[in-house]
Amino acid sequence: MSDPLLSARSVTKAYTLGKRTLEVLRSVSLDVARGDFLALRGASGAGKSTLLHLFGGLDSPNAGEIWFAGKDLAHLPPAELTTLRNRKVGFIFQAYHLLPELDALENVCVPARLARMPVNAAEQRGRELLTRVGLSARMDHKPYELSGGEQQRVAIARALMNEPELILADEPTGNLDSRTGAEIIDLLLNLRADKNTTLIIATHDASVAARAPKVVELVDGKIKTDG
């Protein structure tokens, strides 16, 4: 078997809040193969978002190791880690994190601009992605002019801009009604199938987790089950 795309080895993460230490992850070990679709389940505060941030190089563990495509993230130079996040990882956040002063197309093109993709090529790909997610008529709209489902679709298109190997989605249906949420998951699965992209979704929604062939449940910072 080939090496996993992602590997967490005895990962511990804690935060200091004043005089209090909050343990979020407690010796978590987990491998994710290339092309996997994995659901991370657990209640709020179980450590799902923290594990996603560690996998994507947005944060680092207090102990243990995170490996991405054979590289120990803790030992990458800052510039190389930034490039990895930009080129290899697509983040989809529950709060969307769209830039309010930019329209949908401009938001989608941000990762490409950071990667120094030529402007014309970036805009062409951005238009293709927005069309793919059903927003061909909304490209020049600002985030405040879009519904929650439309903003999430923009966020998905943005995550796919640089053709990442890994998509990390943090509660992507958390702010959506059930019908729109199901459509978002359908969209993610269809887009993933195009490139055999690895997809990890953090969710507390049992109906979302049920669509994943692999499920990991986090309880109080530890893995409870791996189905």
Image (spheres, rainbow, N blue to C red):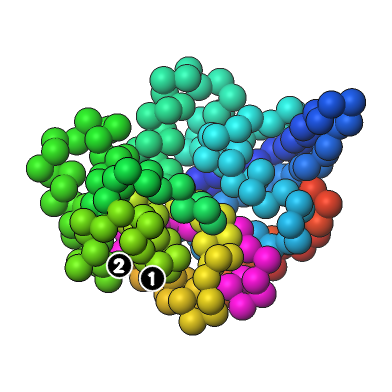
How many other residues sit within 10 Å of disc 2, few (<14), some (14-19) or many (≥20)?
some
Q: Are marks 2 and 1 in contact (CB under 8 Å)?
A: yes
Q: Measuring 26% from the left and 58% from the top, which residue is drawn there?
A: 141
Magenta stretch encompasses residue 201: yes
Label placed on residue 133: 2
Q: Amino acid at mark 2?
A: Val
Q: Residues within 10 Å of mark 1 (few under 14, many from 20)?
A: some
Q: Locate residue 87, reporting x and y percent.
A: 35, 38
- Residue 92 in view of the camera: no
The part of the image, by quadrant, that contains residue 82 is top left
In depth, the one of 17 and 145 nearer the eye is 145
Residue 121 % position (x, y): 13, 44
Q: Quadrant of residue 65?
A: top right
52 sits left or right of 11 in the view: left
* Residue shown at the point (63%, 30%) measured from the top left: 60
Q: Which residues are magenta?
A: 192-209
Q: In the figure, is residue 91 to the left or right of 30?
A: left
Disc 1 residue type (three-letter):
Leu
Query: Residue placed farthest to the bottom in the image?
Result: 179
Considering the numbered disc 2 on the image, is that residue within a helix, a strand or a loop? loop
Whether residue 63 is situated above or below residue 23 in the rendered picture: above
**In the foreground, 208 or 166:** 208
Q: Earlier in the sequence, mark 2 or mark 1?
A: 2
Q: Residue at x 25, y 46 (%)?
A: 106
Which disc, if any, is residue 187? 1
Between residue 225 and residue 219, name the one nearer to us. Answer: 219
Q: Is residue 195 above or below residue 166?
A: below
> Of residues 102 and 5, which is closer to you in this image?
102
